Image (cartoon, coloured by chain):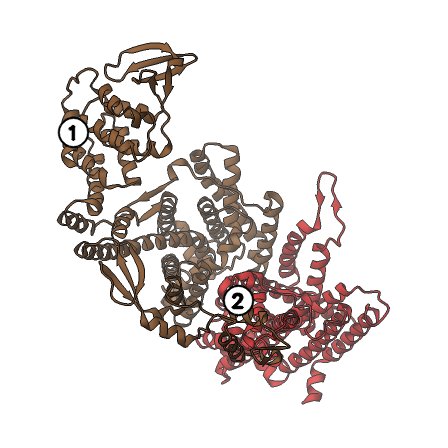
Chain colours: A red, B brown
Amino acid sequence: MRKSFLSENPSVLWFIAALGLFTLVITLLSEATGAGLISTSFVKTLGKTLCLCLIAIAMDVVWGYCGILSLGHFAFFGIGGYAIGMWLMYARTEGIVLESLSGQTIPPTPQEISDAIGNQIFGVVGSSEFPLIWAFADSLFLQLLMVVLVPGLLALVFGWLAFRSRVTGVYLSILTQAMTLALSLYLFQNDSGLRGNNGLSGLQNIPGFEGTPQSTIAIVFFLISATALGAGYVFFAWIVSGKMGSVIKGIRDNEARVRFLGYHVESYKLFVFTITAVISGIAGALYYPQAGIINPGEIAPIASIYLAVWVAIGGRGRLYGAVIGAAFVSLLSSWFTGGGAPDINLGFYIIQWTDWWLVLLGLSFVAVTLLFPKGIGGLFDYLVRKQP
Amino acid sequence: MRRIFYAIALCLGTVMAAQAQELQAILQTHADEIAKPSRKTVDVALEDLIASGLPRVPGFLEAWVGKSVWQRDDGQFFIGSADGDQIALRDVDTGAESVADKSAFKQLKPNGGVRRVIGTALVQFQLSDDNLERRTTAVASIARRPAADQLAPLLASIDGEPDPVLKTRKIQLANFLSARFADSPEERITAINSLAKDTSVEARSVLNQILQTRAGVATSEPDGNLARLLDPMQAPDAFYSQLVEAGFAPARTGPAVIRAALEANITEGRVGGVPLAQLSTDTARERAYAALAREGLAAPLVTTQTRDHALGEYLFYELYDEPNAEITAAAEAALASVEQRVAFAQAADLALDGLSLASIYFLAAIGLAITFGVMGVINMAHGEFIMMGAYTGYVVQTFIPDYTVSILVALPLAFAITFGAGVTMERLVIRHLYHRPLETLLATFGISIALQQLAKNIFGTQARPLTSPDWLDGAWVISDVIAISYIRIAIFVLALIFLALILFVLKRTRLGLEVRAVTQNPGMAASMGINPDRINMLTFGLGSGIAGIAGVAIGLYAKVTSEMGADYIVQSFMTVVVGGVGNVWGTLAGASMIGFLQKGIEWLNPSNTLAAQTYMILFIILFIQFRPKGIVALKGRAAAD
């Protein structure tokens, strides 16, 4: 099985090699472990980009391979971020509170500690009580379990309902979009128990590593993200190859025919939908400690549409395409909006890229869908065909 | 009291020639009270003045309030106005005018409290004034500050009231006053019963005033008109603090109090014999505190049990301020009946709200119902067409200052602009993607963010106003509970017009026939001589143009921003999907369902519109599970995918 799987996907070895090389170079050039040529903030940007690549692969599997255009996968990404963020915030606040209470003459009671933590975390939304969903926030293990379980269960229930009643095509897209909209609207409320529009913040401070410099934390997260991306790539390459991969691609090309061949299409779709949601949650859990803050705006419907656009630009139906698309667009986007690109002076008007980048990006979506339906990944086909 | 006022009414009715100097004589008897009035003493003077029934009394009182009464050195009062060193005088009785040197006169300056008392007395005269405006002001001032002594003059003035509207108002107000202040309980109960059908805020506040209670605590049942006994266990802490305030129980020793006491009494690393290190639980702390209390170093410990025990020993009650039980019973019954009526009225108001929200959703979605519903094109830039329409309205208003004209210009112009934009987009982009619906979604999304950013670059990020004409300002007030603003009515009417227009175009015109033909079977339509390219272009333009007009309407009701389209796009898609694709009636059904549902959920949880939207979307997700084709599902050949 293993042999055939790799021979079917020669790109896996190439990808792992490229990713390994890239990771090695960045590590050697970073501030924490090497020459210090790359700033910590850029290492963080790269680490975040790797997480975005991971969710892009998941999106590619669900859309490019299985034909389900989900416009809600960023919701799972956000849930993963919230799940890990709860532990990060709780544990860090607990440390601070214990330290400040230790100066008092009388040792604090558990109730006093819990009240003080609650006050610290929920003061911004005018509350100090711990909501029920924070019940496991003191345990890293349980919260890590949440990273996997909550997106998985949500996707399972949602997918079961949707696929069972044969909601397909654009209807499913709109339905998934409604799901992520509902979730973000819910989280925007102050009494959602997750600090409303303030979101969770200070996530870059890892409890237990207060003394460790951010440069080291950044490179460690970068390495973990790279490992996760590599593992995710291999995992998804395995999923989409072999007999199961053929069925999945068959569903994309002609769902009815696959059903008539006797396959239980709904189960396959549900499996793909759920497993990609879980991976998205993991990607989110790695992303947000590097970003430092998560708020409900992150999971607005537009984020999920961007995700689909990355995959389309990179090239659907090929895993490396998704990685290229996500990395290319998100890095370019931060270059343009971060003021990296020089303004163009037309004499009568100065084009400032912070203002005009979105216009350019929007028009390039149109150009890619119209002129290069295979995306950037299509260029590889062209090159491979050229060289016999 | 009342007899006096009937007398006044009689006097005012029959203009009688007063004997000269009579008013001045009364004034002289009360010279001290009038020259240096205080709120307590002025009553005597006022009563005598009013009782005299002289026609010049109101004029004098008005002058007094207006600080234009002057007193001469010899004590005589005049109405006057200073002019430099001179003073123009008018005799209080004859009205004879004269001019004198100011130095011999002193101005009377009654303070605010006194002026209010005089004002109240004046109201009695103003109620029967010849001038309608003054009578209306007087009635309004009674309504603002109702008092017992206004009832009689008000009743007396009703019969002579010529203006029918004001007369109704006077009767209503007299009813309110009788309910609270009438002499006999029977009269009050009759008045209260008549309020049972009145849903106005005023009537409810009158009933609530009658039913005002004060809370109390005692060991046995109190005297007086008992409203209800309270169960202290429902909020034990609040009731206990009531006990503490009344001095019946020692203050509660909460965790903070215990902590402070412990901290103040640390001796050699121990408190009350308990080592400090052990004080990290509440029970240990209570034990230490109890030890302190035994030594007299702290107030006695009040635990939850002591609190509950203390609460059990006392009766907590509410007494009506009104001593007569029959009256409070009648008021309770009236209030219950009023509240039932108010609930019905609120339901009607809610239905109106739902209707107007539904028409907004319908307007936003109807263009989409054509492009998505009929043609099957997912146009994510539809929201931006709405935005373009709204900005068109804004730009037109900056050129044409008359709001009515500018709206009339903006509506067709918005249609033309978005029609053009839609046709351009169809020609350049969508035409190439008819067989790849999911990619249309991405391409139009690209156009959507490009247009949004363009609008931001041109118009800036802050919201632009789109002002409605004056005749759309205000609201149609049906009662104190039911009201709907004219803009919402206008949007509702506009939605109805669009529904009719689109049904007409699709069902009764050549274009509509061709559109339906191309939608069902493009190949067959083409072989019948219809040009599908042209029809697709026109249909898409029509859908986009309608979005532009909807934009103007929505802009009147909400703010115009570059992101307003994005706010409506997901809702609009859901409206179309819930209603049933490919059917204008379906969109109407979808918009109605979503609009009413959202208002209904908001009513259940009024403080939180975000939650209402969340639950509504969840409901829609579930709804689509059970009716994947929407409310109005197409049947037969038209339903073929």
Circle 2 or circle 1, nearest the eye: 1
Marks 2/1 same chain:
no
Disc 2 secondary structure class = loop
- Tell which residue pokes out farthest to the front in this image: B295
Q: Image quadrant of residue B606?
A: bottom left
> Are circles 2 and 1 on residues that touch, CB within 8 Å?
no
Q: In which quarter of the image is the C terminus of chain B?
A: bottom left
Q: Is B453 in front, or is B86?
A: B86
Q: Residues within 10 Å of mark 1 (few under 14, many from 20)?
A: some
Which numbered circle lies on residue A202? none
The amino acid beneath tag 2 is Ser
Q: Is B336 in front, or is B260?
A: B260
| Residue A340 visible from this viewpoint | yes
Q: Is B189 in front, or is B304?
A: B304
The residue carrying mark 1 is B9
Q: Where is residue B640 in the image (x, y as percent from the top left)?
A: 42, 67
The residue carrying mark 2 is A128
Disc 1 secondary structure class = helix
Q: Position of residue B147 (x, y in %)?
A: 26, 41
Q: Position of residue B527 (x, y in %)?
A: 46, 58
Subunit that carries the residue with mark 2: A
Subunit that carries the residue with mark 1: B
Q: Residue at 41% of width from left, 60% of height from top? A: B582
Q: Residue at 46% of width from left, 72% of height from top? A: B300
Q: Mark 2 to mark 1: distance in Å?
A: 65 Å
Residue A229 vertical placement versus B129 (above, below): below
